[in-house]
Amino acid sequence: MELLTARLRLREFEEDDWRVTWPYESDPEVVRYQSHGVRTPEESLKYIRDSRATATESPRRIHDLAVVLREDGRLVGRCGLKVVDLEQREGALWYVLDRSQWGKGYISEAAEAMLDFGFQTLGLHRVWADCDPRNEGSVKVVRRLGFRLEAHFRENVFLKGEWCDSLIHAILDREWAARPRK
């Protein structure tokens, strides 16, 4: 599977990609709001292998893709969409980006391509994203994409030694189709 945007190529992970993902997955600032902690090289390799295994499932429910810069082929992150409920046509979006690439609009661009795929190809009705309210960058991404805030759960997740809040944002297929395009 491959998705192309003006600046990005979203592709399946390759076995050796862990060598590129591990440096940013071991960056405490990048994983600060992730459910996992800093990853070891072995954990990054396992993540890549698990992601590759989901690509062969039928029906495929997890689309976890490497985000690669088209200009030079550098892998800078990942963007994923999981079909949470086939019958209800509901999906969940996620993304992670190397800190050196923050603020360049890459995740918004990657997520837009993933959402187009989810709504147009998979026929999803609703896609949601969960983020910590302190993760201002992630909140900006989903709002920029047209997601609406549906819930603010207070201290619903115990993560890295503390109770954390969660924001649930979502967008419907008709809202995605009606949103202004650049």
Image: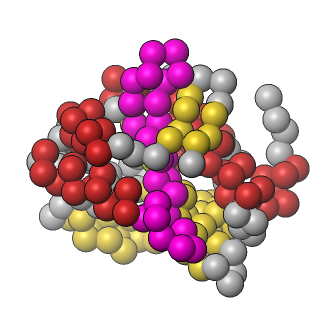
Q: Residue 149: percent from the left, percent from the top?
A: 62, 60
Residue lying at 35% horizontally and 43% vertically, measured from the top left: 14
- Report the residue that reaches farthest toward the right: 178
Task: Judge left or right: residue 177 versus residue 147.
Answer: right
Residue at position x 55%, y 32% in the image: 9
Which residue is at 47% across, 36% downward? 67
- Splitting the image into 4 quarters, where does residue 141 fall? top right
Image position, residue 155 (x, y; %): 34, 71
Q: Is residue 159 above or below residue 41?
A: below
Residue that extends furthest to the bottom in the rendered view of this protein: 87
Q: Is residue 118 above or below residue 8?
A: below
In the foreground, 95 or 7:
7
Task: Say left or right for 27 vs 151.
Answer: left
Residue 150 against residue 63 in the figure, above or below: below
- Asked if one can make out residue 120 in the rendered structure from this viewpoint, the answer is yes
- Which residues are the magenta region? 54-80
Q: Position of residue 98 (x, y in %)?
A: 34, 32
At x 40%, y 37%, the residue is 77
Q: Quadrant of the C terminus?
A: top right
